[in-house]
Each structure stands twice: as structure tokens, then as C-alpha cells.
Amino acid sequence: MPRKWRDKVAVTRYLASRVLPTLLEPVTERELTDRLHEVAHDPVGMRRAMVDHGLVQRTRDGAEYWRTERTEYDL
């Protein structure tokens, strides 16, 4: 993960659009972690960052996640 805040945000936005290409499509926690594991060294930390940055929302129990925001990296 980059040191600069704006670079962290850019990486998080890029990965969110890559691992969750369809807005509002729910995926399980395990499925999201597996997808992130393919592209990130720390998939759990990246999942947390996507939620913290407001790109992804989750159910109260954390069982499902879905992307809520379009990014500049969407096709």
C-alpha cells in the first residue's frame, strides 16, 4: 500500500472496481476476500479500507458486501 493518502485512495478505488465490477451486486465475505487475495497482499486490510473509504457497504453482521460507488476505473 502506498504511503500517501491520495495514492491509498486511488489504489483502493481501483481494486474495488476490479474485484466488484458490478454495482450493488452482493457477494459473501469469503468471496470478496478470495477475490482480493488474488490482487492484494493484505486482502482483509484492503476489504476494510474499501468499507472505510465508502466504496463498499456490508450487512451489519459482515456476511455480505456490495460496491456502492462508481469510480474513474469503471469501464
Image (cartoon, grey):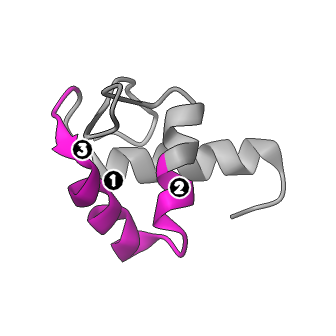
Tell me which numbered mark, 2 or 3, is placed earlier along the sequence. Answer: 3
At which x and y percent is residue 56? Answer: 40, 32
Q: Amino acid at mark 1?
A: Arg
For disc 3, the neighbor class at 10 Å (few under 14, some 14 to 19, many from 20) is some
Q: Amino acid at mark 2?
A: Met
Residue 18, label in figure:
1
Q: What label sits on residue 46 in the rendered view? A: 2
- Residue 26, given in percent of the width and then of the height, sits at 17, 35
Task: Name the mark on residue 21.
Answer: 3
Classify the position of the N terminus by image quarter.
bottom right
Q: Is residue 32 above or below residue 43?
A: above
Tally the numbered discs: 3
- At mark 2, the secondary structure is helix
Q: Amino acid at mark 3?
A: Pro
Distance of mark 2 from mark 3, alpha carbons? 16 Å
Q: Are marks 3 and 1 in contact (CB under 8 Å)?
A: yes
